[in-house]
Structures are given as structure tokens and as C-alpha cells.
Image (cartoon, helix red, strand yellow):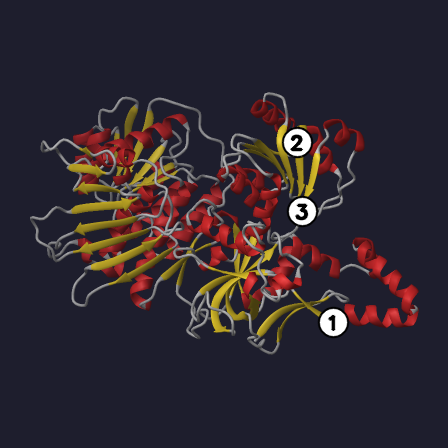
Amino acid sequence: MKQVVQNYKSGELAVLDVPVPGCKPGGVLVRSAYSLISTGTELMKVSEAGMSMLGKARSRPDQVAKVMQSVATNGVPATYRKVMGKLDSYTPLGYSLCGVVEQVGTGIDDVKVGDFVACAGNEHALHAELNWVPRNLYAPVPDGLAPRHAAFGTVGAIAMQGVRQGEPQLGEVALVIGLGLIGQLVVQLLVASGVRVVGVDPDPTRCELAERLGAAACGDPASAAVEAAVGELTDGHGVDQTYLAAGGSSNQPVELAARLCRDRGRVIDIGKCRLDLPWNAYYEKELDVRFSRSYGPGRYDPEYELQGRDYPIGYVRWTERRNLACFLDLAARGRVDVEPLVSHVAAFDDAVETYRRLQDGDLKAVAVLFRYPERAGTGETEAPAVAVPAVGVRRAPRRAAKTPVRLAFVGAGNYATSMLLPHLAGRDGVELSTVVTTTALSAANAQRKFGFAEATTDLDAVLGDGAIDAVFVVTRHSSHAELTRRALLAGKTVFVEKPLALTEDELAGVLAAVEESGNDRLQVGFNRRFAPLLTEAKQRFGTRTGPASLRYLINAGQLQHGSWYLRQGTEGSRFEGEGGHFIDTASWLLGADPVSVYAVAPSGNEDLQVVLRYPDGSTAALSYVTTGAPGFPKETLDLVADGKVLRLDDFVRASVHGPEKWVSSRLPKARDKGQNAELAAFVKAVRTGGPMPVPLESLVATTAATLAVRAGLAGGAPVTLARLR
């Protein structure tokens, strides 16, 4: 098998072929699926290995003291040979992974072969294809938790132990200094505990990430904004607890902790930072300084870790294994979200290059995962994956609010003239400036009917017109991505009817235009999430606490012979053309983007069964059928969770059944699938310069999930939606 190792003397990193470990009693042999690089602890170790001998000595004074003791006991020659022999040996890297049990040792009865487990320990959860893991250093992965997320189990347990040491109480305010991997997890755990959090880090992107994950405010340690936020949240008293999750040689973290803590506050050291406590400051406030020892009680106790002797729960409620299991449970239930922390996923064979890029700063990351080349425990090839590209953009300055908003339409076919333009023509604050079509007559018809100021066949003239604020792309599917790309590069706000793209390359091209131009002002015509009836039903259903099951039947029916929708060679499949509608609706109702897609189809027709899986274990089953009865409603949807059921009948009626029952009016209504509300939200965003109605990340995830259906049909297996960072 292969394993990542390092020579501490030379600093050399390598992926070596080493023997497979035996499966000893009291543990399990685990084949790795994903292992996590700790960008703090591991990179510090890797950096130390590259230092001179003097640098190594300065960085590890504890080891120098041991060497001096050995000199006094054994003499210089013997000590020198011992030290050099130890330095000039390969040492392992890694301590957090998820994999599949391949063999079970005697005495183990809580897991079986084929089960996924999360594993911990710098001797047992290594960056290696196979590891032997003792009983108290693994925990079964809950149903619905993705293996890549379960690989965070160890660092999650470290963060959890730190939070437990702080003893947070509902309503308290905490300060987290250092927003790296551990700090980001501490923030989420505190927020889940009902604590308001202020974060501190010199990296603005990490501050922004922590705020997205629930922190009330974040900023640079030297920023007055941090002190102002603490003062506002605590009425000037100071925070109840401070978590030191930073590293390095600066004494700034402990000094900042003293300044911002309240009288008799708590300071918890989780990271490895300098701890020269300013005596007066800590004495005058009588601050309680606590240390958090790794994953929790049991750590460094060989009887617990190696011999499997557990501590009685009545005396030690949270051991390192219980912390590990608790974190996995929180992640499975969506209380902690590790996906935003994944900056990069690298193939295990590229481990050496990945470490080099991290050291050199070419790869800036909060967390990096190694993905192993075989499906864990089966010997089969890796499950297919579709990339969900990262949305990276330095946003251009927003335009100032203005009226009227000048719109141009590229395309004036049936959908544009029946579903979009009637809601825009005559709308206050909107001017239909120009319509562009490939034939002069269709442009003239649209101009006459809807009152466009101009009609043309010259797209370049429209894109170059600085007076036009937004461009609608309502053409055939094969042109959407390219027209969107050009309009974004021209600085226009863009509304593109679905689909955004028909291939992964087209999707990447659109995002490249976003990155190049700094223009992320994009909306895809996923209108169902704006439908008033469905919006009200979702509100009546209320906040969800557990995983949900969603069933969505789309009775699409047969297309007329000759429809351009049937030109799969150029326009993509029918589902690729409109499937994004239904995936977006499901994701909006479930409040997340899917992590995997499984698709099957009976032979001989276009019917599809698509199952989407979400981070918290929720599932959405889409039945897209063309062989149903024409008289049956086109769309019916059921959402079931927490003892409640939401029912939608073709955007005509809706109901929610639960502790309180709600049924919409049973009087016949016109079907309102949300186009009017969607366009109102889009026009408002253009006019005010405010956020777009749907985040770009969600549009990209929905498009990638739609494209994954094709890959799933071809491969006959679930397709992972691999988010790139």
C-alpha cells in the first residue's frame, strides 16, 4: 500500500510503498476514502522539517531539553547517534480520515465489514491507503453524512473539546482568535450552542467565511471594529470567553484576550501560540485560563487509546471517542457545515505536490482533503464525479441606484413573448430599450407588440451600448452559455433563461468570464422558487429541524414532432434543458445544494428517476416522465419532515399538514409559477445595485447537478458533486 511520509532531517516528503498493517484484536482495518490535511498542525511539522538543525532546536525547546538530559545520562556520542537515527527516519503524517472497514479484529462488535467509520490519531489515522485503528479512535459514520465530511471528525473533536472547556452558556458572547480550520469549527459549535461570536483573524477571506457560518462580526486583530463589536454585543462588559485558536510566535492573542474579556472571564488555549501572560491584566480581571487537550479525555492514555478501556460515562461524560461521535452527529444533522471549509480536494497520488503548494503559498486553503483512488473497501473504480466550480470573483463596484432600468432582449421567441415580456411591458421604472433577434421580422414584431425603443439584429451594438443596464438571454439552449459569457464581459447584468450551460466546459467558461470581469450579476430563470403559492406553503411549513424527504412528480408529456427540444445533438437532452427548474425548487425548499445525484431511466423513452442527496441527509426524488396521462397535473410535490407534510398541486392548490393545518383557497386559480415575482426581484436588484435574487453559488450548483444526471445515466452509479475551491 502507499503512505505519505517525511524525513525530519532532510525535510523530504514522499509517497512510499509500505506493508499493509495487520488487523490486531481490539480494532479494525480501514481502507481510506478521504483523509484531511490539517493546514495548521501538519504544515507546522512540515515547515519544521525544512529548517536547519539550529532552527529545529529553536522551534522545539522541549526536545532540546530531552537531548540535554540524554547527554548527561548517556554521553555525547551515544546521544548523537540516537538523535541522528531518529531524525534520519521516515515519519508519518495525518491524523483525521474517513474510510470503510475492511477487516474486523476480535473483540469488535459495533461495526462490520463495509461500514464507514471516521478515524482519529497521529498513529492510526494516517495519510495511507490502509490503517489499523483501535476501538476508541474510530466512530461509525451516521447515515446521510458524506465520507468527505466525516473526514473532519478528528479536527471537529478537537474544536468540540475546546468549546467544552469554555463551558459556554446560552446568550453569552465569545471571542475566537484565529479563524483557521479549528477556529472556523469553534465558531460554528458556539453558534450552535446559542452563543454570539466575534472572530479575529488578519485574513479578510477567513473573516468573511466565519461571518457566513454564523459569527456576528469578524475583523483584523488591530481593527477598532473588533473592539466596537465586542462593546456593542456585551454592553461594554467584555466577552464571557475567549478561544485561542491561533498559532505563531506573537503574543498578541493573549494580550487581546485580556483586553476584551470581561471580569472573571475564561480564556481557553486550543492552538499553539505564545503564552506570555501579561500578569497585571490577567490578575486584575482574575481571568480563568484553561487548556484544551486535543480530542478530549482519553488522549495520551495508552490504556484508553490502545487497549480500548473506556471511562464510565457517569464519571467522564465526553471522552475523545464520544466527542468524535458527537461531532459526526452534528454534521449529519446540518448543525455544523464543513463543506465551505474545503478549499481543495487532491488525488492521494498528488500528495507531495499538494504539500509543496501549501508550503509555497500557491494553494491558500483552510482545509485540504486527499481523495483515495479506489472506492473504499470494494476495489472498484472511484465513483463518478461532476465538478461544481468555485465562484471566485473580485466584484466590480455596484452601479448606483437608477430609474428607469433599461433592458435589452436577445431572443423574442414564444417563452419570451408569453412568459417574460408581458410582465415587463408597462412596468414602472422599466424601459424596454432594444430587442435583438436573428431575423429582422421577429425583432420588428416584438418591438411593435411590447414597445421596445429599437429593434436590431446587431448583438455587438447592444453589448457596446453603455445605456443598457441588463440583458435578457432568451434564445435556444445551445447559445445560452456563450451569450451569457459575452454579456458578462460587457459589464451587463444578465438574466438567462434555463439552462445556464449544457456542458461542464460551458459552465466553466461562464465562471471564467465572471472572474475576468468582476461581474457576477447573473440570474438564471428558475422561477418556481418565486411562486406565491409555494412561497406561502414553505412559510406555513416553518423551520425544519430534521432531514426531509421530498417527492416531485413532473408529468412532462410528449413533445410535438419536430420540436427543437428534441435536437439532443445540439440543444442537449430535454431534462438538461428544463431539469434545473425542478432541482432548484427542491434545493430551495431544502435550504441547501445537493452533494450527489443518482439517475436511472427505463429503456425506450425519456422518463427519468433522479435522486438528489443533501448535506443534512435529506433526499429529493424527481420523477420526470413523458409517458403519463395528458390530463393529469403537470407538477405535484410532497415535502415530509418533522411530522409535517407540505403538498403542492400544480401551483393551483397547496396545503400543510401538521400540528396546525393550512389549506390554500380551493377556488380555481390561474397557475402562477413565479415569473412575475422573479422579474420584480431581478429589476429591483438591477435598479438598486443590491444582491441578485439567487446567489451565484446556488445557480452553479443547480447547473452542475443537472449535468450530473447525464453522467449518472452513463455510469449507472451515484455521481458525487465535487465542489472545487
Expressed as whole percent of the image width and height from the top left, the position of residue 200 reads 62, 36
**Percent of width and height locating residue 406:** 33, 28
Q: Which residue is mark 2?
A: 265
Query: Residue 57 sits in which quadrant?
Result: bottom right
Callout 3 crowding tier (Cα within 10 Å): few <14, some 14–19, many ≥20:
many
Structural crowding at the residue carrying mark 1, measured as other residues with C-alpha within 10 Å and reported as few (<14), some (14–19) or many (≥20): some
Give the secondary structure at mark 1.
loop
Residue at mark 3 to residue at mark 1: CA–CA distance: 27 Å
Q: Marks 3 and 2, Cα distance to the nearest angstrom? A: 19 Å
Q: Amino acid at mark 2?
A: Gly
**Residue 89: mark in rendering:** 1
Asked if residue 203 lies left or right of residue 602, the reply is right
Residue 555 position in % (x across, y down): 15, 51
Q: Earlier in the sequence, mark 1 or mark 2?
A: 1
Relative horizontal placement of residue 293, taking residue 723 as reference (left or right): right
Q: Nearer the viewer, residue 113 or 649?
A: 113
Camera-nearest residue between 182 and 599:
182
Vertical relation: 384 (above or below) 430: below
Task: Name which of mark 3 and mark 1 comes first in the sequence.
Answer: 1
Residue 83 image-quadrant placement: bottom right
> In terms of secondary structure, where does tag 3 sit?
loop
In the image, 629: left or right of 567? left
* Residue closer to the observer: 190 or 491: 190
Question: Which disc number belongs to residue 271?
Answer: 3
Instruction: Give, as a three-letter code, the residue at label 1.
Output: Ser
**Contact, mark 1 vs mark 2 (Cβ under 8 Å):** no
Tell me residue 151's x, y (percent): 51, 58
